[in-house]
């Protein structure tokens, strides 16, 4: 399984998405990214790890190892799951300092995906980003 | 209407002429001509409405009922004329029975809080259907909590019909309020409210009808229905956001305590005691949404200017056409298959999350709503996370339905 943030980096994603010239290829790529996410154990899909979105749901589990934060994430929607991969490429296996220094809005703007980070979409993605940043603040 | 009558009325309908009245429809979204199929969330506004609001601010803007000058007079006359138009639109006995609110939600909150406070006590029952919008559930839960009454749900079957037999058996003298939607926003079911109202009245219960999803489709007659309260939002009737209507029977409204305090709603104020204004002002504290009311008045005038029978037939024809295509689409499941429906098509694609379908349709210029449609209880009952909802208005075309299905086929290639 692909390790986001390690095998798939922010630069990989910027390169790949920049390469496609139509929305179909971009969204096929995003959906495929979601399929690369390590499978989250069904037993972790609990309320404790649920980041509620009003449309789709996101589960996020974090682990603190050797000064870095590692995340498992899952969603019941394919596109959101792919976008979780896009987010984890930036945040997974990073130090709290790296996480807090990363400008996620600029990254999503560069990818032309900013509308998915807006709270109006209610897809849980924005809430997940916030939760990751909070974890980073707590451990920093 | 019979299908022949639908065909005949539909054939009179010139949709291109109608579309010319709605400027927002003529734009590109994500590089494609917009197909707006989210009419159950909010309807678009004709030029007549946009112009009325803009004219009001350009020429007449002033506070109502209090200025001693020409502008205030003009604003007041237009504002009250709008109330009169709404009264006629609902066939209410008098304009003073039309209360302006911020929307359906506030109208229901007003009745729940004010009527509920005066009339509910421990052990009383409030019945709402299992497919109500959250706006027609939560206000009742709040007043139930405060008074010791309880809220119970009237069962809805797998097709989206209220189980009338079950409703009948739930009714007894403890039922004080029955609050149901005229039309379900999640599925388009047209509920048999005439029957519901007479059954409820037979046990002495009051009835509130949430008309948010009905008013844009046909003329409502509150006297014929004999409902106690009828509520809707202007923005779902081709009017502006921020304005709603509460119709109530006069004796009930008169007996109800004020909802909010402030200016406009009082007769005299002193620290030894305050007396309240007459209907409808008793319930309209503060400066009202004057422009909104004038905009709604213009929307009603607009509806009178078109052939509403033909428009309704066109909507039904769009629904029939879409559902026929849906039944021929592999992996598509319709949610809500009641015999009587407004032009709402809720559906799921097998194996695909509705939110994903929504994103992929948006990429193709098609605006639909996805999610639980603020009707979580019925989605939970069906064991689904929500649906994709395409809702048609009379300005939609058959070609747009075709575009929807082409886009659905494309979405399927991504998701299933
Ligand atoms: C049936 C129904 N009731 C209530 C509402 C709430 O209306 P508003 O948000 O305009 O107050 C809606 C709108 O979504 C609705 O469809």
Image (cartoon, coloured by chain):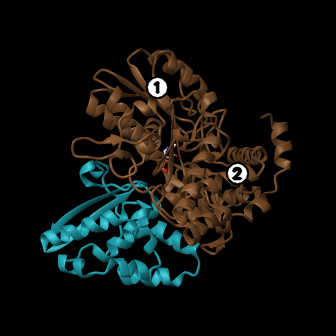
For disc 2, the chain is B
Question: Residue B247: which numbered mark, if any?
Answer: none
Specify few, some or many for label 1: CA neighbours under 10 Å numbering under 14, 14-19, or 20 or more. some
- Determine whether label 1 and label 2 are within 8 Å by CB: no
Depicted B36 relative to depicted B9: above or below: below
Q: Which quadrant is home to the C terminus of chain B?
A: bottom right
Q: Cα distance, mark 1 to mark 2? A: 30 Å
Residue marked by disc 1:
B206
Q: Position of residue B356 (x, y in %)?
A: 50, 59
Residue drawn 34% across and 22% down?
A: B124
Write the residue at 64% across / 34% down: B221
Q: Colour of chain B?
A: brown
Residue B109: quadrant of the picture: top left
Give residue B303's mark. Answer: 2
Q: Is residue B5 left or right of residue B30?
A: right
Q: Report the side of B17 relative to B141 (left or right).
A: right
Q: x, y (%) of residue B100?
A: 49, 48
- Residue for point 38% across, 73% down: A86
């Amino acid at each position: 399984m692909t390790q986001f943030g390690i095998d798939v980096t922010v630069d990989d994603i910027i390169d790949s998405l920049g390469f496609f010239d139509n929305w179909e290829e971009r969204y096929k790529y995003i959906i495929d990214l979601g399929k690369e996410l390590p499978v989250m154990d069904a037993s972790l899909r609990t309320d404790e790890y649920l980041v509620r979105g009003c449309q789709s749901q996101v589960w996020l589990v974090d682990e603190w190892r050797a000064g870095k934060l590692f995340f498992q994430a899952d969603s019941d929607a394919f596109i959101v799951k792919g976008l979780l991969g896009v987010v984890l490429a930036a945040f997974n296996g990073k130090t709290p300092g790296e996480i807090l220094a990363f400008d996620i809005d600029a990254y999503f703007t560069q990818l032309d995906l900013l509308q998915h980070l807006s709270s109006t979409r209610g897809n849980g993605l924005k809430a997940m980003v916030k939760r990751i940043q909070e974890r980073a603040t707590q451990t920093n | 209407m019979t299908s022949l009558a639908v065909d005949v009325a539909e054939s009179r309908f010139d949709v291109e002429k109608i579309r010319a009245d709605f400027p927002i429809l003529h734009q590109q979204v994500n590089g494609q001509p917009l197909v707006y199929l989210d009419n159950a969330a909010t309807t678009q506004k004709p030029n007549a409405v946009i112009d009325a609001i803009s004219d009001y601010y350009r020429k007449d803007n002033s506070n109502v009922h209090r200025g001693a000058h020409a502008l205030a007079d003009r604003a007041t006359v237009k504002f009250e004329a709008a109330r009169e138009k709404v009264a006629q639109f609902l066939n209410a006995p008098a304009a003073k029975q039309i209360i302006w609110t911020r929307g359906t939600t506030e109208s229901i909150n007003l009745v729940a809080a004010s009527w509920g406070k005066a009339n509910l006590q421990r052990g009383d029952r409030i019945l709402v259907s299992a497919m109500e919008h959250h706006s027609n559930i939560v206000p009742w839960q709040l007043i139930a909590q405060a008074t010791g009454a309880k809220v119970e749900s009237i069962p809805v079957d797998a097709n989206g019909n209220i189980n009338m037999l079950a409703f009948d058996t739930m009714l007894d003298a403890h039922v004080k309020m029955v609050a149901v939607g005229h039309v379900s926003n999640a599925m388009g079911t047209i509920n048999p409210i005439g029957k519901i109202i007479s059954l409820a009245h037979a046990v002495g219960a009051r009835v509130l009808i949430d008309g948010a999803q009905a008013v844009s489709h046909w003329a409502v007659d509150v006297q014929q229905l004999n409902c106690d309260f009828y509520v809707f939002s202007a923005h779902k009737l081709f009017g502006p956001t921020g304005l709603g209507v509460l119709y109530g029977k006069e004796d009930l409204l008169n007996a109800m305590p004020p909802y909010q305090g402030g200016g406009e709603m009082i007769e005299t104020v002193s620290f030894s005691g305050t007396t309240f204004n007459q209907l409808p002002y008793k319930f309209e504290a503060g400066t009202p949404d004057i422009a909104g009311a004038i905009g709604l008045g213009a929307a009603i005038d607009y509806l009178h200017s078109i052939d509403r029978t033909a428009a309704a037939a066109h909507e039904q024809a769009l629904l029939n056409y879409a559902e026929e295509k849906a039944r021929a689409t592999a992996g598509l499941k319709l949610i809500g298959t009641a015999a009587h429906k407004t032009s709402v098509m809720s559906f799921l694609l097998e194996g695909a999350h509705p939110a994903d379908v929504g994103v992929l349709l948006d990429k193709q210029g098609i605006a639909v709503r996805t999610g639980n449609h603020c009707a979580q209880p019925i989605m939970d009952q069906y064991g689904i996370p929500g649906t994709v909802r395409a809702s048609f208005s009379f300005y939609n075309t058959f070609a747009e339905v075709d575009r929807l299905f082409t886009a659905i086929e494309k979405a399927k290639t991504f998701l299933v």
